[in-house]
Amino acid sequence: MDQERERARQIGYEDPINPTYEATSDMYHKNLNYFMQKIIETGIENKKIAIMVATHNEDTVRFTVNK
């Protein structure tokens, strides 16, 4: 995180690190929702989009399974 923040400062782009654990989880869930919706829109049987939920966060796993 420190290296990414320093790189952002040096190059001049916004700090890409979420400010809190909760903000990180919210961003992860937002992206999961987006891509799961894209899978539904393109038709699950078409298999054009696939995702892997790679997390150690039990709440995120539960969130995904419940979607």
Image (cartoon, grey):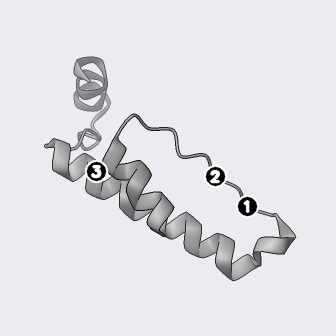
Place residue 15 in its image quadrant. top left
Between discs 3 and 1, the one toward the N terminus: 3
Place residue 66 in its image quadrant. bottom left
x and y percentages locating residue 59 in the rendered image: 32, 50
Give the numbered dot on residue 49: 1
Q: Determine contact: label 3, label 1, CB under 8 Å.
A: no
Q: Amino acid at mark 2?
A: Ile
Q: Which residue is mark 2?
A: 51
Q: Quadrant of the N terminus?
A: top left
Q: Secondary structure at mark 2?
A: loop
Q: Is residue 67 above or below residue 63?
A: below
Label 2 and label 1: CA atoms lie apart by 7 Å
x and y percentages locating residue 28 in the rendered image: 38, 52
Residue shown at 22% from the left, 44% from the top: 18
Q: Which residue is mark 3?
A: 25
Q: Nearer the viewer, residue 44 or 9?
A: 44
| In the displayed structure image, the side of residue 33 where residue 50 appears, left or right | right
Residue shown at 32% from the left, 30% from the top: 11
Q: Amino acid at mark 3?
A: Ser
Q: Amino acid at mark 1?
A: Ile
Between discs 2 and 3, the one toward the N terminus: 3
Q: Nearer the viewer, residue 1 or 14?
A: 1
Spot the residue most to the right.
46
x and y percentages locating residue 27 in the rendered image: 32, 55
